[in-house]
Amino acid sequence: MATQTEPTSSPPRASGWRGLFLRLHFYAGVLVGPFVLIAALTGVLYAATPQMESWIYADQLRAPVGLNQVSLADQVKAAQAANPGGDLVAVRPAPEPGDTTRVLFSEDGLGESERRAVFVDPATAQVRGDLVAYGSSGALPLRTTLDQLHRNLLLGEPGRLYSELAASWLWVVALGGLVLWVSRRRARRNEAAKTESARGKSVRRHGSVGLWVLLGALFLSATGLTWSAYAGENVSALRESLGWATPALKVTGGDEHAGHAGHGEAPAPGPARPESVDAMLASARAAGIDAPSVEIGLPTKPGAPWQVAEVERGWPTQVDAVAVDGTTGQILGEVRFADYPLMAKLARWGIDAHMGVLFGWPNQIALLLLGGGLVTLVVLGYRMWWRRRPTRATGLTFGRPIPRGQWRKAPPALVAGLVVLAAAIGWFVPLFGISLLAFLVIDLLLGLRSGRGSKAESTDVTG
């Protein structure tokens, strides 16, 4: 059966600045399309993990609601008996009736930011299982796997380059597409009404979807760069220099060896006792730590204070934290979300929204729609490129790119401005700068090769 093809395989002709933007948008889209596609698909999967975790790990996460609750200290002892080889580092009390308490341990063989979570029924102190939990979010194995797949394709640190490359270029492609959409709309208003070609319909669909996901794409790009490997370091340095960094919990109300000054060689305080966990939580509650979800961190060394922090990332954000003296229960330091700099608050909200936890299921649905829109954009873009391929060529061929030399037709001031802007952005977002430079070098080499081929063909014909 014959396949319907476009009446022409030539790319659209554009002049001046629009031709330059069209070529940049085309090559940037071809470059990052696969990376954006993978990031969107894995992001969609990650957005659905809270419900999947609740179902898959129901035995560990849920327990029958009891009339009474045993002390946290007894729950910790039960967890220690079930995991005698681990070092107790933190406790997350059951946030709601029917939830289990997480007792967290460090142990040999776990990766960075991983802890062993032992789940305890708060009504009976019965251990209901254990799993490896990852990061401050306490992600369980399924969500951790999807998170790492989204972040680095399960390839470790080298794999992070893929997601950073996607985030580095996504905003460029999105804004370039907006410029082209606006210019196309203006051009069509000045033209007489005429039948739209098949290619014109494809471009219109691509532009319409791009317009709907524009703000979301910019948001994902900005928040994704904040925790990327290289651009993320520059973002952190900029926030630090401008006073926008997230405040750290500092001990200001006492000293870890207070009470021993002037008394010679006083014995060093002993290790923290798990029996104190209930008292530490009570002190923190009295100091205003009132979120249902909290983490009680044991001292990192003898004499250091306990830390009790809220870990509620949903709206309204509750991430206050206090340092508590393990002997007296005195509050030695605190940090309140209300006191965060505005940019630190925006960073916290942006990351939580990117992860789909800030606004609950509406947040998840928005991410699912956004991810689907990005997948559609990439597929439509490659489809347009494929349909521009030469129809009479033999073998595998691809669509023709936008003709070279568009920068010569653009206003010099625009070209100069773009060069300066690209250099500045390339310095701050290194993967953008490196990949842009690589693209220009490859394009130049292909241009030289094409030029030599054309000269050779001309010589053969005239010879």
Image (cartoon, helix red, strand yellow):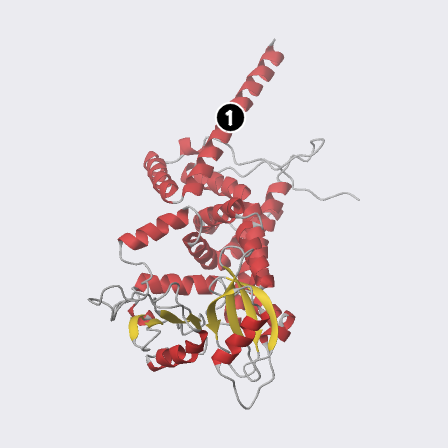
In the rendered structure, which amino acid carries the disc numbered 1? Leu
Q: Where is residue 122 in the image (x, y as percent from the top left)?
A: 54, 81
**In the rendered image, the vertical position of residue 309 relative to residue 31, given as above or below:** below
| Closest to the observer, 330 or 444 | 330
Quadrant of image for the C terminus = top right
**Residue 188: percent from the left, percent from the top?**
48, 49
- Relative to 427, is 378 above or below? below
Q: Which residue is drawn at 33% across and 65% down?
A: 268
Task: State whether residue 372 appears in this view.
Answer: no
For label 1, the SS is helix
Residue 316: tell me if it is visible.
Answer: yes
Residue 368, percent across and down?
56, 63
State whether residue 22 is above or below residue 460: below
View extreme (bottom): residue: 67
Image point (60%, 68%), residue name: 130
The number of callouts visible is: 1
Identify the image quadrant of residue 41. Answer: bottom right
| In-image side of 53 versus 314 (left or right) | right
Mark 1 neighbour class, 10 Å CA radius: few under 14, some 14 to 19, many 20 or more: few
**Residue 127 screen position, x and y as percent:** 60, 76
Say which residue label 1 marks: 445
Residue at the far left in the pictured view: 262
Question: At 74% from the left edge and 43% from the top edge, which residue is drawn?
Answer: 3
Residue drawn at x 32%, y 36% is 413
